[in-house]
Structures are given as C-alpha cells and as structure tokens.
Image (cartoon, grey):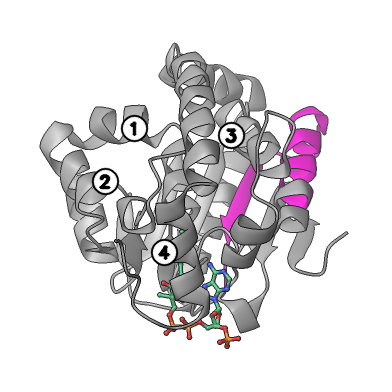
Amino acid sequence: MSQQLLIDQSDSILTLTLHRPDKKNALTRDMYAALADAIQAAQTEDGIRAVIIQGSEQCFTSGNDVSDFINQPPGGQDSPVSRFLKAICHAEKPLIAAVNGPAVGVGTTMLLHCDLVYVADNARLKMPFVNLGLCPEAGSSFLLPRLLGHLRAAELLLLGEEVSGQRAADIGLANQALPAGRAVLNAARAAALRIAELPPGSIRLTKQLIRQGVADVANDVMEREGEHFAALLRGPEAREALSAFMEKRKPIFA
Ligand code: COA
C-alpha cells in the first residue's frame, strides 16, 4: 500500500486519507491505483458501510500530479486515474468527502460522484482545465450542469473560476460549510457513523435509485472526455501550461 494513501477501517467505515503533504496531496498514478483498489474492494466487503475520502486539515488535494501529466500522461480505460474514476462512478456504497483547503481539478470533480460533501468555509474549489489547455474530466461536463445549471457550471468550467467552500455549499456543490480543520473531518465521520447504523440493504438500494441513470451516462461522458483530455495533454497548450507551473512562471500561449 502506498504511504501516500492512508487506509483505515474502523466502525464499519473505510477512511481513505490523501497524504502527500509536501506536494499538497497531488495525486500520482500509485495513489489513484491504491484509491481504486480500496474503493472497489469496499463494495464487496460486508464490514464496510461507507467510504470517506479526505485530505488533511489543511489541504484536500492539488489535483493530478503535474509532473505525472508531463512525463506519464494517462490514456486508456485501464490507466489508474480511469480505474479510480470508474470506481467512484459505480460505487454502490455511500461515498463521503471531507474537504479542507484547496481541491483542484480532480479534487473538485471527484466530489460530483460523492453522496455527501463537507467542506471548510474557506476551502478553495477549482477546475482550471481551460487554464491548463485541457477540458473537463471525470464526467464533470455532464454532472456539473446537472447539479448547478448551465450558467454556474459554465462559470466554473469556462472561466476556471475558484469557489470558496461557503459558496460551494450555497450553490449545492457541498452539503455543508464548516469552520476549517478538524470540524470538517468530524462532520464526514459523523455522517458515515449514522449511515453505518442504518439498514445496509436499504442504504444500498436508495443510493442506487438516487443515481439511477446517472452513473451510466456519467461513465459514457467520462470516456469521451478522457479521449479529448488525453489528446490535449499531449498538445502544445497543455505542455506549455504544465511546464510553466513546474517552472514557477507564467505560461506563454503563442
Ligand atoms: N502536482 C505536482 N506538484 C504540485 C502540485 C501538483 N498538482 N500542486 C502543488 N505541487 C507542488 C508545488 O510544485 C510545490 O512543490 P515545491 O515545494 O517542490 O516547489 C509544492 O507542491 C507546494 O505547492 P505551492 O504551489 O507552493 O503551494 P501553495 O499553497 O502556494 O498553492 C495550490 C497550493 C494547490 C493552490 C497550488 O499548488 C496549485 O494551484 N497547484 C496546481 C494544481 C493544478 O494545476 N493541478 C492540476 C489540475 S488538472
């Protein structure tokens, strides 16, 4: 198991903690693979009633590791990131997220697959795909307008606008905004504990009914987005934007 993903199973709850503090919990291929394996295994493990995905009290995640994007751009349905996205898209048990600090790129799009989302009021949610010469991923081009309406989704995806945790809760991107830090992780755990005490068959069916039709469409959209995303990642605009980030300079788009 990767030490960059801490896995804890207690009180019938699987807690997955992103733990790469020196890189703001940027997600590597190994971390995606470990997340995918853990979430998939949880679906058939009777002792697990809910899954929490969290970062630290300071940071959720800065998104996909940018040097991985440059050196090992993902492609194909078997890549670790695709396996992770499919695992959260098709999860049958409740997924709960606890978000402190930045949630960049997939850090925000993964929330669209969660059932309950708790955020710090000063969390920073952002999907800067256009800024990086990329396009939406994780089914977000379908899920975000469905959740927020076209105009708000466009604001976030076309302008790459950042939203605070408080605003995320106000517009329906999160259940609740809380004071930053431990309170957010506690809220996620409290919700998971409530679920763990409820009848599992009813919980499973209710999630299935709420997600009826959504997971299959999101999956198809995700595959189409993935093809464009993989092509763009290898293109000049993304190469320049990603190199500029690593070199701590402003990108120049000729
Ligand atoms: N991939 C790889 N490294 C990353 C990273 C990422 N996604 N995000 C941050 N890091 C690294 C930085 O390069 C820096 O490394 P260094 O200390 O070796 O120089 C370290 O993490 C700290 O990041 P820094 O930017 O200095 O922290 P910050 O608190 O000023 O800002 C963020 C935090 C998350 C807002 C900012 O790092 C950011 O915007 N990251 C890029 C996110 C991104 O574009 N992700 C891809 C989305 S598709």
Left or right: 150, with 9 as reference point = left
Q: Which residue bears the numbered disc 4? A: 241
Which of marks 1 and 2 precedes in the sequence?
Answer: 1
Circle 2 residue: 157
Separation of marks 4 and 3 at Cα, in angstroms? 47 Å
203 to 38, vertically: above or below: above
Tag 3 and tag 1, C-beta contact below 8 Å: no
**Residue carrying label 1:** 141
Quick one: label 4 or label 1, which is nearer the N terminus? 1
Name the residue rendered at 74%, 63% in the picture: 5
Q: Are marks 4 and 2 in contact (CB under 8 Å)?
A: no
Q: In the image, 110: left or right of 118?
A: right
Residue at point 16% right, 32% down? 150
Give percent across and percent down for residue 163.
24, 61
Q: Position of residue 120 (x, y in %)?
A: 36, 69
Q: Give coordinates of residue 58: x percent, y percent.
A: 49, 80
Question: Which amino acid type corresponds to the residue marked 1 in the rendered image?
Answer: Ser
Query: How far apart are the two marked residues, 3 and 1, measured between alpha carbons?
Result: 33 Å
Most distant residue in the front direction:
254
